[in-house]
Image (spheres, rainbow, N blue to C red):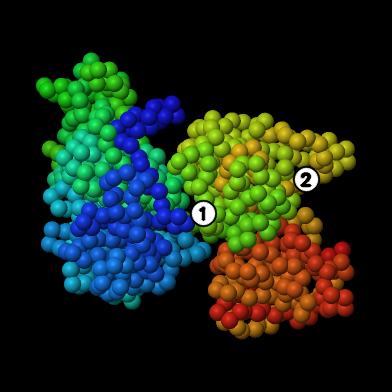
Amino acid sequence: MIGLLLTALQQESDCWTVEHYPLPAGEVIEVGGMDFGPEGDLWVSTRRGQVWRVSDPLGDPATAEWTLFAEGLYEGLGLNWHQGRLLVLQRGELSELLDHDGDGACDEIRTLTQDWGMSGNYHEFAFGLPDDADGNLWMSLNLGFWSPEWWHGMSKAPLRGWILRVTPDGVITPWANGARSPCGLGFGPDGNLFYTDNQGDWMPTSPIFHVERGDWFGHPASLRWTEEYGNGERIPSSTEPAPRERKPAAVWIPYKWSRSAANLFLDQSGGAFGPFSGQMIVGELTNGMLLRADLEEVQGQWQGVVWPLRQNVGSICRVAQAADGSVFCGFTNRGWGGLSPGHGLARVRFTGVTPFEVLTARATEDGFALRFTEAVDPASLTAAAARVTQYDYFDWWDYGSPQQNLVPRAVASWTPDADGLGARLRIVGLEPAMCAEVLLDGVRSATGAPLLHPEFHATLNQLPGRERTSAQVAKRVTPPEARAVTDEGWLHLTWADPFDLWNGGEGWQLVDADVDPADPRRFSVRPGQGALVNGDGRAPDLISENQFGDLEFRFSFMLPQGGDSGLYFMERYELQLVDDPWQCGGVINGKNPRQDAYRGPGQWHVATGRFYAPRFDPRTGAKTAHARFEDVALDGLITVPACEAEEITPGGLSGEAPRGALRFQGHAGRVAIGDVRVRLLEEDAQGLEWTTIREEALSAKDGAELSLPNYLGSAPHELAFRARWTGKGGAVELSPAVRIALAGGGGAEPKTGSLLGLFEIGADLIPEGVWCELRVRLGGDGVQVTLNEMQLPSAEPPRGAALLARPHLLAARGGAVEIADLRWRPVP
């Protein structure tokens, strides 16, 4: 597969070049909107609130001139030069930007409309901003997402999850709803409006929807702002299907090609961008590529086929076609996780070399009518040349859906077209209300060339000539059981101050990082908090201060070309992180990865799995069980189901359940890592029974103080409880000398688990709103705090300070703290 992919990438570059634009010194251009102005300049709005003018964009990228026109806006995720006016869609308003004195800088920001709601949630984006033939503007509003059940999109403010029409003078009409994260809007064939959404709850994978007034696209949250739900009075269920039928998606893009679809447009270049004029060009952020979609209307419903077009472009959030047919791609991935580069601008140009491709694939009663970009060899059109699999999806609240009900379909026959440029493919048992994956590995051109992209995916809502079906590709099923709050029990070892719990941090940088387009063996870094990067790849190893045994792990990593690192468990069992699909995600002296889950340099990957420490006979010291790994995965794809591992650094281990540090290799090659988490799988080893003081929860908020139930204790003893915090948090005070912080966030304040005035933790180990388990041991040797089974440094209070007093729960002003399951036991 990898060899085929590399071949495809090389051929893509023969047909479409990617040119990256140098950026103004020191600037981070996170593109949210783009349009060409009346003089041919490219105008760019950014997530950081700036608007830039790029002069001579169609010339040499190295000589394009960037001029800052405006700044201080609130997240410009849409821009349109509309009827001679420069309009920018901010998070909270649609604005006109005016330059009264003609000096090239904005003098006035005039509100056109702000008739939608915001709650302040970080995810409440406003996207846009295409215009239709009547001069109306179109925008879409993202749902909000709150911890700890971050997977449920919610519409807490008016019109969240809606598509809106805006007249030139700013009058808003709510047009359609049921959207989740509607990043892209664009007009397609015959002036029809389409929008892209991102896979997640109630969105099995990333779709393209046709938009008509009154449509509902499947996510229930936005129904809150309808008469049916009292225009805000009632809140739709997040887990039960809404009592209506969703609009069928025109295209369900397979997950492997798209996890975060950007905007889309109709290629009207007449061949200047290649042979696909009249089709939709779709940006893709996560995988950093351009896709194309061929749409048609069958029995009153839009449906279509999707292919990759150009891979390895960057984290595309916005696409726009220039007058010469080239496609400008604006990048951003902060918080969204996409292919490097994660900010900036590139131009994709057709070289004039037309690849051998399927030009169109139109549904027939029993298959597809295919047209090719050049003559096809009829001798290659055999049953073995094509493989067809149909599948559908589950329509449910869970985060996306795997492909379901996969059914292989046999090829019945091929019939070449008389002109040699097409063929009729007939398939046995083809059904509507399903998707079809079609692999044409054996098809060859008349000159013997294989297809550049031999695979396409068709969404078949209907089949022409067949009885119209009411079934859908996304099928309602019994909702799954409620998901547990997955953050419970986890420790976030690199949040807030990422070096606080690690040694060897010199040589590592906390920055935002992308693979450098000019030299893909290196990282391009800029100020930020997105990654820990080991400089030139010769930094000291990053070693945890804490010792761990059995644990579950999760972390993110990105490699440049030739990157090489590894995570060592107990400093001697290595999970490989290397720019090689046959090694990355494998275990040294254990097992190589069973599948190539590694997607290549410049891609952020999430590594997960479980590690179990070796076991030894406590009497003889002989090893009774090897260390082992289970369910090691990259991005959810299992690379090592289970394996034992031999030590890389032998010796020095003993005890019933030995422990050791985590170690990220810093000296073998370049790597970027982030969001390192562990969940300890060890049980309380003391085996002493607890006495319950109170099971029910107790809480205090906004500066309040609450006395906790007293307990029968004299040192040494141990107190245990579950706790969580919101806002600015607070503390549990066991005595004036023993105060345990329950707080977090990005500031310098002590974080959860800190003993205030004794030792303070800078790493934000526990997120806001998530329950954690705390144990506090008080004895003659001081105070020992254990957080989610991880021991924190012990502390000795000042001489004479009382360790015991009537305990209190203290909330900070603007914060809240809550504890439950309060227990006590003596300690020998």
Which residue sits at x=23%, y=24%? 412
Answer yes or no: is residue 222 visible: no
Which residue sits at x=21%, y=44%? 324
Residue 658: mark: 2
Amino acid type at circle 1 is Arg
Measured as percent of width and height from the top left, residue 637 is found at: 50, 40
Residue 526: mark: 1
* Nearest the eye: 532 or 199: 532
* Nearest the eye: 628 or 690: 628
SS of the residue at dot 2? Answer: loop
Occupied quadrant, residue 612: top right
Which of label 2 and label 1 is nearer to you? 1
Which residue sits at x=60%, y=74%? 729
Which residue sits at x=34%, y=71%? 92
Disc 2 and disc 1 in contact, CB within 8 angstroms: no
Amino acid type at circle 2 is Pro
Q: Is residue 589 left or right of residue 196?
A: right
